[in-house]
Amino acid sequence: MLTELGKKAKEAEKTLMIATTEQKNKALKYIAQALIENADEIIQANTIDLENGKNNGMSEAMLDRLKLDKGRIKGMAKGVEDVVLLPDPVGRVLSETTRPNGLNIKKVSTPLGVIGVIFEARPNVTSDAAALCLKSGNTVILRGGKEAINSNRIIAKTMREAVKKSGLSEDVIQLVEDTSRESANALMQMNEYVDVLIPRGGAGLIQAVVKNATVPVIETGVGNCHIYIDKDANVDMAADIVYNAKTNRVSVCNAAESLLIHKDIAKEALPKIKAKLDEKSVELFGDEEAVDIAKGIEKATERDWGTEYLDYKMSVKIVNSLDEAVDHIYKYSTGHSECIVTENKEAAEEFLNKVDSAAVYVNASTRFTDGGEFGFGAEIGISTQKLHARGPIGLPELQSFKYKIYGNGQVR
């Protein structure tokens, strides 16, 4: 079954890679329209997934990731429409030079080819990934988790019918309906048909792909995101930023998990931040100083500093300096997103320069690490690696390049 999908993807790649911007945008517009028109059918399928998730003991945070309603489906359609408005990344001349022998050499952006996307219980990834791959000239094989199979099946069917209506091959988008571990492992080793694999999900999924794949992988991120409250911070601003970064949506990778506070401001800042977090019943796990400053904070263990909770939980540490905060981040961060809250411009620049994560903020919530918020229309994931793609994976990151060389009879 997977071999058949791979063959179809390779065949569809031949036409998609040379499709015009107008052809691709037409297909994307049809997809956005079809998602809205089929919202009731998608929600009906999603209801089955939600019920199965509840019966299987899925956490509230994961159920929130899984849930679709008309508002979220409109958001999915909007994400596709936003991709329509973005410049076509295919065929851009990245550099050009003429050699002394007269050869004209152009470095030109090209699609990666066939992209495999393995993801878990977020059905919106199905449309985000498909839209970005289509616009960037890549065919895509989607393999979601069993938690969202009914939702994914209807979304994929809707998109394929829309693409076919536009005149392109529906096989530019395909879904692996077998959600067994065997199908995932097989996709990871389809070197003959798959050019790049992108995992999107929890730490377990990402590490399984990184360790088992023979296909090249763009590693996306587990998010142990930190917020450092500097001694020169505006405390009210700090409380608002921490509250948003932690509680706006706890189940996502750009939610803040760790809070660092300078000792000079801790007695003022920590109680105010905790009072704000108490509104959402966030559990705090702190070092001895944090426990002494504010009641209701549990003693942290070593494990807490490196945990991506994806829940209403957060670790708290009091630090003596900006450098100590940076050292802590270096030790425990996953390289996703970090923030400093400060009114001191020199401290802000020092933090930006010293912290080596994909996204580093001054006085803003880590929740903005998102393809849509960055103006990319959508994203396939957040890359925490340093090769090729880093941060939100949008259209430019789904490109490779080739050299076009023009001569007039040169021989060597």
Image (cartoon, grey):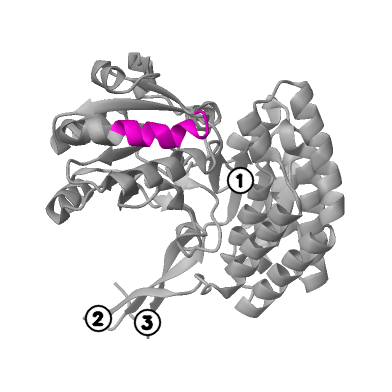
| Labelled pair 3, 2 in contact (Cβ < 8 Å) | no
**How many angstroms separate mark 2 from mark 1 (CA)?**
42 Å
- Could you tell me which quadrant the C terminus lies in? bottom left
> Which span of residues is magenta-colored?
270-281
Q: Is residue 353 visible?
A: yes
**How many angstroms separate mark 3 from mark 1 (CA)?**
37 Å
Q: Amino acid at mark 2?
A: Asn
Q: Position of residue 168 (x, y in %)?
A: 75, 69
| Nearest to the observer: residue 195 or residue 53 | 53
Residue 377 falls in which quadrant of the image?
bottom right
**How many angstroms separate mark 3 from mark 2 (CA)?**
9 Å
Check residue 272 for magenta coloring.
yes
Rendered image: mark on residue 378: none
- Could you tell me which quadrant the N terminus lies in? top right
Q: Which residue is mark 1?
A: 116
Please, what secondary structure does the residue beneath circle 3 have?
loop
In-image side of 243 versus 98 (left or right): right
| Labelled pair 2, 1 in contact (Cβ < 8 Å) | no
Q: Amino acid at mark 3?
A: Gly
Please, what secondary structure does the residue beneath circle 1 have?
strand
Q: Which residue is mark 3?
A: 407
Q: Which residue is mark 2?
A: 101
In-image side of 232 versus 159 (left or right): left
- Callout 1: few (<14), some (14-19), or many (20+) C-alpha neighbours within 10 Å? many
